[in-house]
Image (cartoon, grey):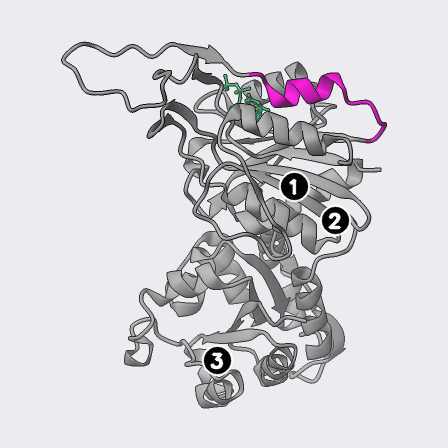
Amino acid sequence: MLHDKTIILAISSSIAAYKSCEIVSQLKKLGAEVWVVMTREATNLVTPLTFRTLSGNPVICDLFSPELSKIPVPHISLTKKADLLLIAPCTANIIGKIASGIADDALTTMVLASSCQKLIAPAMNPLMWNNVVVGDNVKRLKKLNFEFIGPEEGKLACGDEDIGRMSEPEAIVSKAASLLVAKQDLAGKHILVTAGGTREAIDPVRYISNRSSGRMGYSLATAARERGASVTLISGPTNLSAPLDIKPIIVESAGGMLEAVMDYYNNANAVIMAAAVADYTTRKVQSTNQSKIKKSNKNLELVLRPTQDILATLSKQKGRKGRVLVGFALETHDLIENAKKKLKAKDLDLVVANDPKTFDSDAIKFSIIDKKGKISAFPQLAKSQAAHMILDRVSAYVR
Ligand code: CTP
């Protein structure tokens, strides 16, 4: 079930740490690759050797430990690779540090450096859990998309029966799995996704293009497939490998992308235009006989003509009820205002607003704006996670 997933299990100093052994062993049974990071204090409760044996990987207590010398910059390379960071047990102290952006040990540094999904299983005394400060910190983390499980009511280490017990390992593992294995809400639906930048030929060897890597579109295609959709991925040339089970249709130019989209549009329940389509193309390939433009000392002028807007073309023939159109708006200024204008001009159902920092990055900070003008802002997230947030919205519209 979790055979292609990497999970970082962060263990802080609560007596519930003994239950984390069972969490590691259950995650391993489900096929996940597990890395354990512990606070120094937690190592007084259960030894790193136990977790090393159960996980099959070195345990991280100190980012500079010689044991980790083979892993370059462990807090970055491991967190980049991780699909989930699970903090179980998570003390009030660690919740407070994470909520304040403190990174003063291996565990908190890895949390701060990670953009994957995060799940927290708190464990503490009821007086601490009910403390307003802890409550505020939890609220803040929930707003930042941290998931929580527990704490539960029951017998506590201090002898009291009250809220504060860490949830049972089975419940934590099943919540972790449900976060990683997508719901099948798009089963039976056909989603068309475009990705990457287009290339407009100047001559047979040169072209005009943009910095799009295609990663957002590929993540959307992967996430839609995970949620049961049949997916058509139309992509400009990229360096990315094809997502599992999907054979991308590779196009070169804006004209090529328009043609391919029109070929598949009729069967689609939703079209997500994540591609950075060229707004202008060369009026004609400059060299009519298909040979390379030769160097000279004179200025060379390129005449560009506007391309046809794919989304605007689609929205004019929306036809079948329930077909959803999603655009991306990449803006260097007035992000929300410009994105709203695009939503209206292209008659879209949703627009995803982001800025150029997104290019060539694994992460994206974005807002989703819907037809009614509702804006949902998201913190910086891994594109794989952002894709699911976007599809949550798409799924609510698709019929
Ligand atoms: N788009 C499209 N056809 C084009 C150009 C863009 O369908 N010929 C789509 C993009 O895939 C994206 C949305 O329109 O989903 C917005 O693209 P963007 O480049 O941000 O905006 P433009 O409409 O091109 O306007 P501008 O470049 O002036 O910001």
Q: Vertical placement of 84 versus 299: above or below? A: below
Q: Of 332 and 271, which appears nearest the observer?
A: 271
Q: Of 233 and 95, which appears nearest the observer?
A: 233
Residue 327 rendering spot, x and y as whole percentages: 62, 28
Disc 1 target residue? 390
For residue 309: magenta? yes
Q: Vertical placement of 286 versus 43: above or below? A: above
Which of the 4 image quadrants contains residue 73?
bottom left
Residue 146: tell me if it is visible: yes
Q: Which residues are magenta?
A: 308-322
Residue drawn at the location 34% of the way across and 71% of the way down: 71
Q: Secondary structure at mark 1?
A: helix
What amino acid is labelled 2 in the image?
A: Ala
First-in-chain label (2 vs 3): 3
- 10 Å crowding of disc 2: few (<14), some (14-19), many (20+): many
Compared across the picture, whether 319 is left or right of 13 comes to: right
- Location of the C terminus by quadrant is top right
